[in-house]
Image: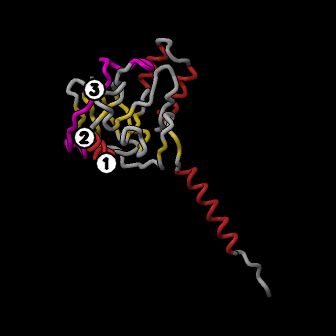
């Protein structure tokens, strides 16, 4: 009795190509809205690392397992106060999480933050800055632990990134050596608190 050949080299090669394509989609090379590429997102246990940025101190503090591990000098947006809308050059305040890690950033390395958060969306809806549809998109993304849409009037694309010539338009800038250290321990899901 002759059995059909189920595994030919052509079939194995075709299966490998399909796995590679589906793997790329599932684990995802993609692009940020800024056009910068980012690889599959790394995830870490929640609560292991906490980043606290203090605008008044001009410092960024890193806590690992509840203990202060590192302090960095930081540069914030040039306009004081909580970010309200696109282009206001303010660094947002509140609780966020890292929603994207970007090794190919124009500013050495970068960690994208989940701004606007739910509170920003509620304020934006209340004040007539965004529509109910935009509000729902933001809230859905936050509930799913993803990057919220960065294309609403509230603005977006707030990153912790490397040195940018001594200024930033609302992001948080660190020295290149400092962002390299932070990049090694922060992942998608890392909690970030930005204080006034």
**Label of residue 62 in the image:** 2
**Label of residue 47 in the image:** none
The answer to whether any part of residue 139 appears in the image is no
**Neighbourhood count class around disc 3 (C-alpha, 10 Å): few under 14, some 14–19, many 20 upward:** some
Check the image and report above or below for 80 versus 21: above
Residue, disc 1: 185
Front-lying residue, 143 or 114: 114
Along the polypeptide, which appears first: circle 3 or circle 1? 1
Say whether marks 2 and 3 touch (CB < 8 Å): no
Q: What element carries label 2?
A: strand
Q: What element carries label 1?
A: helix
Q: What stretch is highlighted in magenta?
A: 63-88
Q: In this view, does 76 lie to the left or right of 158?
A: left
Say whether marks 2 and 1 touch (CB < 8 Å): yes
Percent coordinates x, y for residue 85 in the rendering? 44, 18
| Quadrant including the C terminus | top left
Residue, disc 3: 195
* The stretch drawn in magenta includes residue 40: no
């Amino acid at each position: 009795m002759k059995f059909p050949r189920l595994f030919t080299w052509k079939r194995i090669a075709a299966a490998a190509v399909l796995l590679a394509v589906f793997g790329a989609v599932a684990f995802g090379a993609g692009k940020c809205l800024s056009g910068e590429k980012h690889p599959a997102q790394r995830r870490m246990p929640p609560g292991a690392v906490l980043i606290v940025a203090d605008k008044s101190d001009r410092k960024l503090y890193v806590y690992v397992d509840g203990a202060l591990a590192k302090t960095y000098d930081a540069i914030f947006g040039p306009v004081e106060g909580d970010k309200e809308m696109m282009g206001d050059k303010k660094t947002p305040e509140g609780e966020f999480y890292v929603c994207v890690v970007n090794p190919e950033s124009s500013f050495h390395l970068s960690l994208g933050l989940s701004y606007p958060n739910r509170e920003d969306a509620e304020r934006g809806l209340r004040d007539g800055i965004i529509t109910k549809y935009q509000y729902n998109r933001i809230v859905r993304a936050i509930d799913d632990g993803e990057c919220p849409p960065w294309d609403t009037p509230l603005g977006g694309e707030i990153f912790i990134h490397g040195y940018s010539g001594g200024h930033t338009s609302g992001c948080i800038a660190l020295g290149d050596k400092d962002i390299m250290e932070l990049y090694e321990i922060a992942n998608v899901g890392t909690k970030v608190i930005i204080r006034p």
